[in-house]
Image: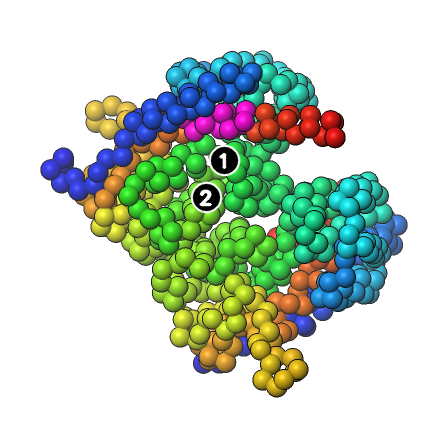
Amino acid sequence: MTAMHRAALIDGKAIAARKRAEIAQQAEALAVDGWQPRLVSISVGDTAAAALYVRNQQRSAESAGVQFEARTYDASMSLEQLVGVLQGLNADPRVNGIIIQRPLPDHIPVKALQRAVHPLKDVEGMHPASIGNIVYNDLALGPCTAVAAVEILKTLPLRLEGLDVTVIGHSEIVGKPITFLLMGLGATVTVCHHMTRSVAMHSRASDAVFVAVGKPGLVTGEMVKPGAALIDIGINRVETPDGPRTVGDADFASCAGVAGWITPVPGGVGPVTVAILMQNAVLATQLQKEHYAAEYANTEA
Amino acid sequence: MTASVIDGKAFAASVREKVAGHVARLKEEHGIIPGLAVVLVGEDPASQVYVRSKGKQTVEVGMKSFEHRLEADTPESDLLALIDQLNTDPGVHGILVQLPLPGHLNEDLVINSIDPAKDVDGFHVSNVGLLGTGQKSMVPCTPLGSLMMLRDHLGSLSGLDAVVIGRSNIVGKPMAQLLLGDSCTVTIAHSRTKDLPGVVRRADIVVAAVGRPEMVPGDWIKPGATVIDVGINRLPSEEEGGKGRLVGDCHYASCAEVAGAITPVPGGVGPMTIACLLANTVTACCRASGLAEPEGLTA
């Protein structure tokens, strides 16, 4: 199979490590000013499902110079109680970012919790105001996976202005924000989804393809323009004769024979996503610092 | 093939009629009269015309119209105080601040100080985010009007290829979101797009919103496509001192030869904008009063 590779593998782990090193410097500069970036992670109920993510985030935070506190709450907590917890964290100047781990118990609607996080502390980029800022092309805390996917494209020697891009999947937290981020950078973006008649017609005409659907093998080599970049955001567990494996939405073997660049799964978008969470933590801290400075200046005036 | 003409004037009248019906019902069944407040700062002649015609149409559908005209040099704090007062006024269900504002006023700050639930223009950053995440929001009027016309003409839009030309915050971006919401495959093209004719030729639906007179010629249009022309451009006058002709972003005569349906300029999307403003006000009023919102008046 290796002999058929045409595509260069995009090393998400290396990109993430470079990012974390940059973030660590910014975090340190903020800490010197008295603004040590600090994240609080909230898990509710059965925490085993998210434990791996929380551990990953904790490790990434440590190497990025961001403090990280993992809190767990009992599944019996009501929405009102949890919103109360969030309001406390919103008001606490020592907390710069709040992460709501999923899954949540059935009686807790995730959107209601996300809306309760102060937009300046919304390091996951899930608050409507954060999404609105992305659409308006303002400096903002973007959804981590979407920002990570776009950051990966930016590391390639491609001119984004005028680049033809197909985004497969129009989810609110991945596909759509990727679309608006890329549009802001000057790309011509086509968004495909389960109702699209011919995804291949669009993807084959594109210099870069993003796929975020959650269907293994959805994108095959013949759907990709030779030399194009393929950013695979899917994470799927599949059973193989050699045991369970994690694969993306692209059929890696056939796509790697055609694409110019491809992200592996695992080891592509995933690690960068966690690094972006830390980048958001630093950006959120910076925004809060400016916000407090402006408030203070106003009381002086 | 000659395109059928989508008559925006007649369609807008039918939307206003629907709105008037809901207003009458709200009054009769619940004793509620929807109210729309329009704030105009300064003397911009075009804005004055808009505000007058908004006020007139608001009253015609049975709603209350509140006009606030402020001097061009009004301090920002005064404007924000007025918005604050309108935000808390239970008789006001919709607030519209006429843009553009004079240079000394921060438009973003002013728009984002409107209560998102009363932001009938749909420009508040929270409404943009709510629309972007498929939640209930206030939808900007021009794209909403365009969507209503497309649904009326085509029925289901699901699976159709749509191209939006122009990525403005007030038309292109929300239009793309709305078309995605109706399950179109959407391409957003703009000034940096490499092969605009090729991109447009793939589309079953073309929404042109760039503000460049007659830039889309008929030979870019796929035969049978539906063309929504949002542009309103005035050509230079041929006689001295005269008024030039109004044209859209599409070259009407040649596009109409190829398209299945097309909106004219004037008389297409234009009249829909105020009709949708009224529709948004009724929707906002129903939501604020905890009543079921009217069907077919929002996305």
Residue type, mark 2 in image: Leu
Contact check, label 2 and label 1, Cβ < 8 Å: yes
Q: Does the magenta stretch include residue A280?
A: yes
Residue at the limit of the structure toward the front, as seen here = A301
Identify the residue at horizontal 56%, vertical 67% (top origin): B231
* Label disc, if present, on residue A217 of the rendered structure: none
Identify the residue at horizontal 25%, vertical 41% (top origin): A261
Q: Does the magenta stretch include residue B48?
A: no
Residue at the limit of the structure toward the left, as seen here = A3
* Label disc, if present, on residue A142 of the rendered structure: 1
Magenta segment: A275-286
Q: Is residue B130 above or below residue A55?
A: below
Q: In this view, does B262 lie above or below A79?
A: below
Where residue B283 appears, as percent x and y from the top left, is 72, 51
Where residue A101 appears, as percent x and y from the top left, is 51, 23
Q: Nearer the viewer, residue B8 or A260?
A: A260
Q: Is residue A71 above or below residue A289?
A: above
Residue type, mark 1 in image: Gly
Where residue B90 appears, as percent x and y from the top left, is 84, 43
Q: Which quarter of the figure is the C terminus of chain A placed in?
A: top right
Where residue B109 appears, as percent x and y from the top left, is 67, 42
Identify the residue at horizontal 50%, vertical 59% (top origin): B166
> Of helix, strand and loop, which one carries label 2?
helix
Give left or right: position of B249 versus B8: left
Identify the residue at horizontal 73%, vertical 26% (top origin): A300
Q: Which colour scheme is used?
A: rainbow
Q: Which quarter of the figure is the N terminus of chain A placed in?
A: top left
Q: Which of A17 and B141 is in front in this view?
A: A17
Residue where numbered disc 2 is placed: A181
> Of helix, strand and loop, which one carries label 1?
loop
**Chain of the residue on which disc 1 is drawn:** A
